[in-house]
Amino acid sequence: MMKEFEFRGISEVIATTISGSGDPNAAPMGIISDGNLYARVYTNTQTYANIKATKKMVANIVDDPLLFVLSALMKLSIDEFRMEDGDPVLKAAKAWIVFECSIEDDPQCATVTLRPLKKKIIQRSIQPVNRGFNAVIEATIYATRYLAMKDQKYLRWIEHCDEIVIKCGGEREKEAMRTLKDFLGGG
């Protein structure tokens, strides 16, 4: 079922979940592949609460750096979602996979084992690797860690990523980095 999706190492997706009351949520997430698929989810997040309640998560494969930033730092508008058989999917997704989730609880960061239930490839597109896009994803991860831990090293690392975006990124990557820095108060 998963041969079209080459999860290796840690692959970044935007995970979408839904609350018991039907409110969709989106957040970037690294899916770890080491023979099995799993994710590490902080237990103080809406994503964790939704997975715990529904035992499901959708991995959205997207290529929009701004969407990664927005989903990491703020609540996405309901207009960004559509429902597929009761599962929240991002309209911008190039592909998605619905996973059944089993949780191994930990006080701070649970391990969520992922079992694919269904998938859909919407658009097959080939894009060359863009260092600016990759730097935005890395900066987004650092931003969420900075917000959680307040460690200044993450701000320095974000600045390094910004230099790469300035040199290598396209307009969407530069807009994403400006949005991230504005959110952190350093734009």
Image: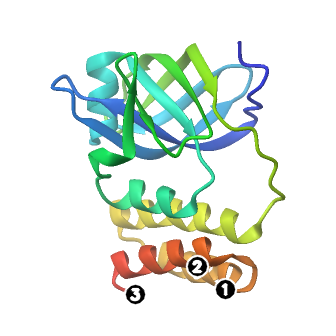
Which disc number belongs to residue 186? 3
Towards the viewer: 122 or 181: 122
Towards the viewer: 53 or 36: 53
Which quadrant of the rendered structure holds the N terminus?
A: top right
Which quadrant of the rendered structure holds the C terminus?
A: bottom left
Q: Is residue 89 left or right of residue 51?
A: right
**Residue 183 is drawn in which quadrant?**
bottom left
Report which residue position mark 1 lands on.
166
**Residue 93 is drawn in which quadrant?**
top right
Q: Position of residue 112 (x, y in %)?
A: 47, 24
Kind of residue at badge 2: Lys
Vertical position of residue 106 compared to residue 149: above or below = above
Q: Position of residue 158 (x, y in %)?
A: 55, 76
Residue drawn at x 77%, y 65% is 130
As drawn, which residue projects farthest toward the left? 21
**Residue 54 is drawn in which quadrant?**
top left
Q: Earlier in the sequence, mark 1 or mark 2?
A: 1
Which disc number belongs to residue 174? 2
Kind of residue at badge 3: Gly
Q: Earlier in the sequence, mark 3 or mark 2?
A: 2
Q: Secondary structure at mark 2?
A: helix
Residue drawn at x 48%, y 78% is 155
Q: Earlier in the sequence, mark 3 or mark 1?
A: 1
Can see residue 109? Answer: no
Q: Is residue 112 left or right of residue 149?
A: right
Which disc number belongs to residue 148? none
Q: Which label sits in the foreground, 3 or 2?
A: 2
Q: Secondary structure at mark 3?
A: loop
Q: Secondary structure at mark 1?
A: helix
Kind of residue at badge 1: Ile
Q: Is residue 174 left or right of residue 112?
A: right
